[in-house]
Image: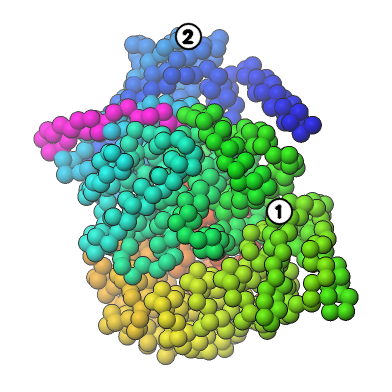
Amino acid sequence: MKKGLLTLFIVAFASYSQAQMKSPPRVEQGVSYELAQFRKNTLSGIRYELSLNIPESKSERIKANEILHFTYKKQDEAPLQIDFKEEAASLISVSVNGKAVKPVLENEHIIIESRFLQSGANEIHFTFLAGNAALNRRDGYLYTLFVPDRARTMFPCFDQPNLKANYTLSLTIPEKWNALANGKLKETSIRKGTKTLNFAASDQLPTYLFSFAAGDFKDFTAKIGKEDSKILYRETDSVKIKNSMDSVFTLYRNSLAYYEKWTDIPHPFQKHGMVAVPDFQFGGMEHPGAILFQNSTLFLDKNATQNQLNSRSNLIAHEVAHLWFGDMVTMDWFNDVWMKEVFANFMADKSTGAASDKSVYDLKFLTTHFPAAYSVDRTLGANPIRQTLDNLKNAGMMYGPIIYNKAPIMMRQLELLTGEENFRKGIDEYLKKYAYSNATWPDLIRILDQYTDEDLQSWNKVWVNDPGRPVFDNEVQYKGNTIDQFTILQHPEHGKEHKSWPQEFQIALFYPDRVEKTEVKISGRQQEITALKGKMKPLFILQNSSGIGYGIFGIDKGMLSNFSLVKDPVNRASAYISLYENMLGGTGISPQDLLYFFTAQLQNETSELNLRLIMGYISGIYWEFLPESQRIKESENLENTLWKGLQVQTTKNNKKILFDGYQVIFQSKKAYDNLYAIWKSQTPPEGVSLNDEDYTGLALSLSLRNNNNNDLLQEQLARIKNPDRINRFKIIMKAASSDQKIRDDFFKSLSEKQNRTNESAVGAAVGYLHHPLRQQTSISYLPKTLELLQEIQKTGDIFFPDNWLRSAFGNYQDPKALEIVNQFLLNNPDYNKILKNKILQASDNLRRAQKLVK
């Protein structure tokens, strides 16, 4: 029955797609689904030969030549559209099959008339100036970042994921520069202060995975497998380099070995290569042979915290997983971009978890994914995992915590539903069937459907195609001192639709001398747990004690007074998260009471991941859900508790977490003087290790509490030696300045695209502009912040719109700020739906604060 319905859907979809092909697609901006389908049906055998002459100065344009080869199924008189999002003057000459033609650039497409094309092999030559939008040209280096549809901003191409191609690249660069690309380096020639690097043809790749980096990079070579593999980097801290380089390659090799064994497929591409990018706007990007990584995540000193080490291992594992999931098997259309991300995160969790016991894996999975997923899924702007997409120009807006964090939770539940072995067999079939090709989520579900008797279509609707999360509670009836009936109930958090989330989780009963745990597998709106009938009445009940279940789980208030009985770190993490989510929903506990509870745990909590979790919650409650008068009242007591906890904690990482928390919340003069002395003397508290970046962060924290901070900021600038970190600080210090005119001028400057190119630094700077201690003046920036959002989306990379909004609205509780949001949405009823959702997501805590701040 279910397989028959799925087949009908696939046939209907294919018929619809064929119907769409009857007429040629319109010439419109972006890459429409209609255009993508037309080209998929008419193009094959695509090859690009690119030659770029890159000057040292980032202000000089890059001269380029391209030969585009392809096989074409000619469609009557329909013209061919080749994507190129640049000004007409950048397209210098075009010749088609040996005949020069007049360059025609219309709505971001080069139009090639049908009369110049032939059925079969075709060859088009372009001479042009490369577009800069996705070249990320900085002082002394550049790197390409073409995901999801930005290859067309640099060179003429068919910029869609299901037209894979081979790329042959030649780069002419300054002689002192270095470079890396997808293909192996074949030969290098030097002439008059420049050198030309010729790279071998890449493997079959979609345009968003074609990449290169060039610049004043150092390089380090090590073996990965039998091949010499190179990493390019600009880090200047020799201690960090020495402490990190072997670890980076070891983590890479370990991830590679795990995936080769798990998938039974050898590394799918011709080479390995990495580039560590300063101020990289992503964590990483999975270009085969030229994976980009955020420099600060890779290079750590010997005092790195467990969280930093976890972040590095997860990042490397994530990007290496993409070589199979996304690079070898690529989504057919960017509505399924989440597929590559869910597998990268899910498999990264598996590979890094393989090196530790289950409890460590469970705690990391819980604290990494659940709070981030809830931060979007609880909001009025929540989006489903799988979204619809009409045009690739909107694809960048689909990224966010749902695909990176809810999707792995969903995938874990799917593995539990089908069984680990059946799940692995299904994924193995999927990878081998679609290797070096493209696939959709229905393709994968159709395969997994063969390995289980469960109703995956119904499951898929609520987990993948719908947004939101369930609210769970329990009803307990006692007979004397024993449980007579225990019922779990669930309903959607928002809306009146009657639906349920099939999933597994655990319930724990806590007694003075023991804990009794029961596994629950729920599929409907309510379910009696017969295994609990006859159990002794506990001191309290902890729902979702294993942290595997997804949703809001009700809180037993008996837990708060008996929390010392919760010995398992995973149980504690699940309880912390449930308490916070219930507080946000206005049920169970007030912000002030939860602040007191979390503060009381600071000296007792021994798990680094849990301590970081509750410290983050303390900061959020303090700044977002306490009125200013209450914050001032609580400030000194909280400072003292943190400082005392810093002395009591025994591990250096836990001490560091509390020290970082102390400098986030402090407001008293006593605390300022204490921290200023630490910064000035560069002498950290006993047992706490601070590096250059820590002192930079401390200087910025101090500057927010200093009404004349120019000297402090200038002294910190003079301390920084790394040129890339100097450039970053110069951006941020304008936003942190105590001079309002400097801040006003800085915000005004962000209206210009060229002042937003370092998106990582700008995002951090916007956060300082809108810090709660500056909001009396910064609230005036909010209307313009919203007005700029569509321009930010058009010109920035995929994570920048969300970063822009959250950095601006993240800490507000002022009703006037919410009024600005509501008025903007009211005045723009036809606003882009995805961007509107991002506004609702970023302002969710602001909306909740109106009820919670009392």
Q: Residue furthest left?
A: 192
Tag 2 residue:
119
Which residue is located at x 52 percent, y 34 percent? Answer: 431
Q: Are marks 2 and 1 in contact (CB under 8 Å)?
A: no
Where does residue 246 sit, x and y in percent of width and height?
28, 55
Image position of 196 with respect to 117: above or below: below
Q: Quadrant of residue 601?
A: bottom right
Question: Residue placed at 31% from the left, 67% from the top?
Answer: 302
Does 421 appear above or below 314?
above
Magenta-span inclusion, residue 197: yes
Packing grade of label 1 (10 A; few <14, some 14-19, many >=20) is: many
464 vs 481, nearest the viewer:
481
| Mark 1, residue position | 503
Q: Is residue 620 above or below residue 463?
A: below
Q: How busy is the neighbourhood of tag 2: few (under 14 within 10 Å), some, or many (20 plus)?
A: few
In the image, residue 532 lies in the stretch drawn in magenta: no
Residue 737 x, y percent position in the rendering: 38, 72
| Image position of 279 (left or right of 443) | left
Magenta segment range? Answer: 185-209
Q: Nearer the viewer, mark 2 or mark 1?
A: 1
The quarter of the rendered structure image containing the C terminus is: bottom right
Residue sitting nearer the eye, 290 or 502: 502
Residue 480 is left or right of residue 25, and the answer is right
Q: Locate residue 49 relative to residue 619 in the image: left or right.
A: left
Which quadrant of the structure image shows residue 150? top left
Compare marks 2 and 1 and give the one earlier in the sequence: 2
